Image: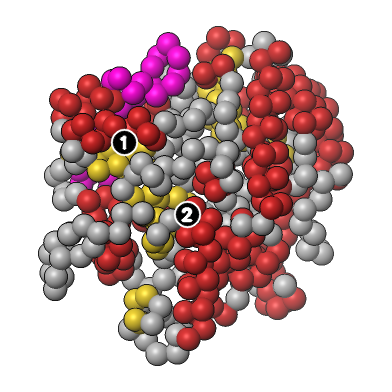
Amino acid sequence: MQNLKEQFPDIYAAIRDETRRQTETLEMIASENFVSLPVLEALGSVMTNKYAEGYPRARYYGGCDHVDVVEGKARFNVKKLFDAAYANVQPHSGSQANMAAYLTLAKPGDTVMGMHLNHGGHLTHGSPVNFSGRLFNIVPYTISPETGRIDYDLMAKLAREHKPKIIVTGASAYPRIIEFDKVKEICDDVGAYHVADIAHIAGLVATGLHPSPLPYADIVTSTTHKTLRGPRGGLILTNVEGGEFILENMPKPKTMPEAIDAWVFPGCQGGPLMHVIAAKAVAFMEARKPEFAEYQQQVVKNAAVLAETLLSEGYSLVTGGTDNHLILMDLAPKGLQGRAAERALEAAGITTNKNMVPNDPQKPFITSGVRIGTPALTTRGMKEDEMRQIGKMIAYILGDLDDEARQKKVRQEVSELCKKFIFYEIPPE
Ligand code: DSN
């Protein structure tokens, strides 16, 4: 980064300091991960210069031979990874993927059912402040207050009552298996489409550690940067090859894959980010290697051990544990707030995020919960022993949120631990 360092020292310094932060603290935000050096190299490449509106071999610009290679590789590898018949790798983000998926299947004003944001859903699953809540008539489903798990009976009841066009599954803060097969039954019963957003669990799905929604969903969307460990971005998959989707202003009815392609571009987006698509191709090839399956197994084992440790330290977890890569601590029984907990943990070098818990008495900016994930630390090579150590550190910090001496002590312990698991080299001063 010599040129950056010499010509734009402030930006260079911020990148160096961010590398140091990622290296010298414990990154436990459940939706974050550390990409490989080949992924970073592809992201920082001249592919960013190329306009390539359209799709491989059908572009609106000349000079697309090489970008066609990377988009072709990305599509081929992601289809193999998820056993899907069709893939679109152009969505700039999970939100853009969801927008294109919904518009493929429903018209503005139609009813869409998604998991309530405060119960672990996502903004794009129907929040009133998001395009989803503004364009569609949203009927949120929730988790059971008793079990903390998705209430499929309630989902079925709401579906029969409101006859949605789409039921969206997937979540941002749900620690248990999602039963896509049950949702398909509900969809079939009321004639709804099923969109499964696997952004959080994509790496687990790709390696068989979570049931795949592909046999049960009309469209599957995802981000590429969470458990899947690719660059920041989105994707869309389907195994429904036929259909007849009449798109306004388009020449003829389209099949499901053609309709999705048309809604991504030109429906929702302009030029694809070819440097990101090159990096997605690399990440999808990495994810097809046996080491990736071992990595995902360790992510799940690490989350389970962390959960056991926190439980044995007397803390409550939503659903009492985890099946996947994340844990949702419910701090209400201890009289604590999520925001204060997040801040105290950050002061000790442990990065998490505050999160709503079921029936949270607090507002979303305060919350009673903290969400903790293991994907990033597992990428660094941490295993069960480190999770036990970290679980104890978290419990110690939460034991007194105002005790700065505790935070200092744990910060030192975190520094020592991080030195044993260096992943990125810190750029020089
Ligand atoms: N903001 C992401 C998360 O943290 O889960 C979801 O998009």
129 on left or right of 308: left
Amino acid type, callout 2: Asp
Query: In terms of image quadrants, where is residue 182?
Result: top left
Query: In terms of image quadrants, where is residue 395?
Result: top right
- Spatial CA span between label 1 and label 2: 18 Å
Element type at marker 2? loop
Disc 1 designates what residue?
184
195 on left or right of 19: left
Amino acid type, callout 1: Lys
Image coordinates of residue 327 in percent, x first then y, are 58, 28
Q: Residue at x 55, y 9 (%)?
A: 333
Mark carried by residue 361: none
214 on left or right of 285: left
Relative vertical location of residue 259 with respect to residue 327 in this rendering, above or below? below
Image coordinates of residue 122 in percent, x first then y, are 39, 38
Relative vertical location of residue 155 with respect to residue 2 in this rendering, above or below? above
Q: Residue at x 63, y 48 (%)?
A: 33
- The reply to whether residue 406 is in sight is yes
- Magenta residues, as a range? 127-154
Disc 2 designates what residue?
83
* Residue 136 counted in the magenta span: yes
